[in-house]
Every structure is written in structure tokens, then in C-alpha cells.
Amino acid sequence: MTTSSTTTSATTTHGTVTSADGTTLAWSRTGSGPDLVMVHCVATSRTATPQPDLPGALAEHFTVWTYDRRGTGESGTTEPYAVEREFEDLAAIVALAEGRPVTAYGFSSGATLLLLAAEAGAPVARLALLEPPLMPADPEHAARAEAQRLIDEDLEAAHRWFNVEVVGVPAEVLAELPPLSTQDLENTRTIVHELTFLPGTSAARFASITTPTLVIASEATDPGMLDGVRELADAVPSATAAVLPGEWHGVDDATLTDAIHGFVSGK
């Protein structure tokens, strides 16, 4: 593993690290305190994320590491894709903490990715997960094939299809989202990654996880998502559920930060 870094201010450092398969990953670090790694959701990156201010909020309590998952933002990618490479990516970022215990926070599909990584023995001390989606098996890989077809034809159409048909974003929520940037469209190419590892994830699958886990949901989220969070808390002995004030598939930064800080500090 090789690393490089550039300090751009008194509190924020940016750099790169090389994952096990040679892929270069771009990362940022801010704040001080116990180490926390953020794992973004589908087709987003450090600068194109639905939680742009969360690192700053968490930095009041933590040393916060964010990184562009492979194929997004400034990170590279290596074909063929396999979710195990993302486990290696996470390990490469965790290693930047130089042996200190690390909490991993994931949102949406990033949270499901963390469950899979923990199942595989990821080197993290705790998991804090915001509304991880759980999906039935897709043995014919139909969704992934449709995603690739749309990506090859029209990235904007692929983005909309994924959000409406797979994620289930309500029309009124989708209408309020800002126009897609060039980076949003490029990041959309990675929806096939999510459709490789999300199918076949059920709460029962993760019953063997022993990592202390906080699974968070918004009280105003999709009922199916809320059910999934409760099912995880029931199925995973090391997990507890927290239902917090919020909106559809989201909790505000201050409330989320308080919950994660309380979980990590034992308060």
C-alpha cells in the first residue's frame, strides 16, 4: 500500500492511497478525536454527496476520513468489479488510522456495503449505519443488466431509473433534487456496482456479525426501510436500532452526529 497527502488547511488534509489491486483511492481527513470513516452511498463521491456537510459536523467529535469509492470522484477503478475489492478499499482507508480503532459510518447502500464488509471480517471497531437497503436475490441479474443498458445509452436516464425503480425515491423528492452535475452523471456509471452486491441481502444474512452496530432510521422514512432497520436490530445480536426525527431517507446532520457520538462514547 502506498499513500500520499497534501495539507490544504489547518484542519483538512487530502491524499491518495493504493488499494490491494493497485486502484488509487482519493481521501480527505478533517477534525480530531477518535477515527471515523464515512462510506458514501451509490454513485456519489466526497464532493457530490447528499450529505455534504456531515463530515464537518462529525469533525467536532471525530477525526473524519472520507473517500471516493472506486469509480467515483477522483478515485480510479479496475475491472472486473467485485465487492471484495471494496472491502480491500475500506481496509486501505482504515489503515491510514495507523492502528487506532475505527468506527465506520455508512449511508444507504454504503451502509449495506459495510454490513457485507463486516461479515467478511473488515477491520473496524464499530458500525453506524443509516438506513441500509436490503434487497431480495436477483439470480438472473436482470436489474444489473438493465442498469448497464441504460448507462450505455443515456446516463441521465440511468440515474432516474435507478432512483425511481430501484431506490423508490418519491416523485416529489426527486423533483426537489438539484440538476445533475457532470460528476453526478459520471458517478452514475457505478450503479452497476451496487446492483452486484445489494441483491440477496436480508437481515438474517448478517446474524453472524459481532461488530457493535448502531442501525439508524428516520421516523419519516419509507415504511419498508424502517422495517428493514428493525429487522436488522432483531437479527444481529450486536446491533441496536435508533429511530430518530428526520425526513424521507434522511436525518439532519446535528441529530445524526449526536447519535453517532453517543454510540461511540457509550453515552
Image (tube, rainbow, N blue to C red):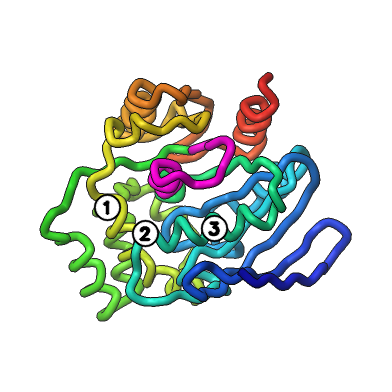
Q: Secondary structure at mark 3?
A: loop
Looking at the image, tell me whether mark 1 or mark 2 is earlier in sequence order.
2
Q: Nearer the viewer, residue 48 or 264?
A: 264
Over which residues does the magenta segment extend? 113-129
* Residue at figure coordinates x 54%, y 68% from the top left: 19
Mark 3 residue type: Thr
Indicate which label's residue lies in the foreground, 2 or 3. 2
Q: Secondary structure at mark 1?
A: helix
The N terminus lies in quadrant: bottom right
- The residue that mark 2 highlights is 83
Query: What percent of the width, then of the height, locates residue 60?
Result: 78, 40
- The residue that mark 3 highlights is 49
Crowding at mark 2 (Cα within 10 Å: few <14, some 14-19, many 20+)? some
C-alpha distance separating marks 1 and 2: 19 Å
Q: Secondary structure at mark 2?
A: helix
Residue located farthest toward the bottom when viewing the structure as drawn = 153
Left or right placement of residue 201 versus residue 127 in this view: left
